[in-house]
Amino acid sequence: MHQSHPSGSSEAVVVLGFKNPQPDANFINRIRVRVALRSIDPAAETRLIFSGGLTTATKSEARVMADYAVNTLGYRGTYLLEEESRTTWENITNLLPMVEDVDRIKIASLPAHALKARAYVRRQRPDLAPKLVNAADYKFGELAALKPALAAYGLRTLRAVREDLP
């Protein structure tokens, strides 16, 4: 499938959180943060957004992922936090006002979950659909031993696109 790339110099790279009750980023959230950081276009004005609500008494998923990006991966740029959402649908609902003025929107997650989130953007704000572009969510050989399990989970995630609508 050919994906057009909207022109312009600004982008939002959105990182969606995954059930993270511990104070440090879990395996899935670490993957999603790495996808986000490698998706940043160095030639663009990038708005990095971590999205995910409270999972512990003191830290949201968004904060846990931002801390991982800064403290472990050495990210030194600016970022925004969306700390209210509890589901993918809510992630999209809550962050859309934060991305509506950029030229490109990238959703950083595992491929099937990113596809689900892009479908939710199209449902909630069809006017923003032309701004959606793929993040760098696929890297050859990455997580090769886990691909079958991740594919099965991804199919379940995509099936939920029909079921998750409010």
Image (cartoon, rainbow, N blue to C red):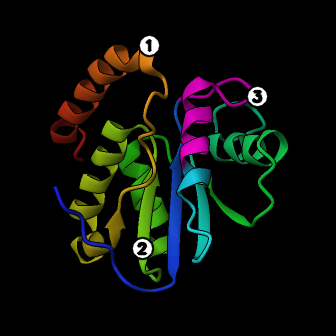
Give the residue pinned by disc 2: 104
Q: Split into 4 quadrants, where in the image is the N terminus?
A: bottom left
Magenta-colored stretch includes residue 114:
no
The magenta stretch is: 19-35
Q: CA distance from mark 1 to mark 2?
A: 32 Å
Q: Which mark is residue 145?
A: 1
* Residue 30, image x, y percentages: 62, 33
Please state which of residues 62 and 102 is positioned toward the viewer in this rendering. 102
Q: Nearer the viewer, mark 1 or mark 2?
A: 1
Q: At numbered mark 3, what does the secondary structure look like: helix, strand or loop?
A: loop
**Residue under the image location 56 percent in, 67 percent down:** 41
From the viewer's perspective, is 44 left or right of 93? right
User: Which badge, 1 or 3, comes first in the chain's sequence?
Assistant: 3
Residue under label 3: 23
- In the rendered image, which quarter is residue 61 located in? top right
Magenta highlight on residue 31: yes
Residue found 30% across the figure and 28% down from its top: 154
Q: In the rendered structure, which amino acid carries the disc numbered 3?
A: Pro
Residue kind at label 1, given as amino acid type: Ala
CB under 8 Å between callouts 1 and 3?
no
Mark closer to the observer (1, 3)? 1
Q: Is residue 60 left or right of residue 76?
A: left
Residue for point 60% across, 70% down? 47
Give how far apart the Cα atoms at labels 2 and 3 are: 31 Å
Q: Is residue 90 visible?
A: yes
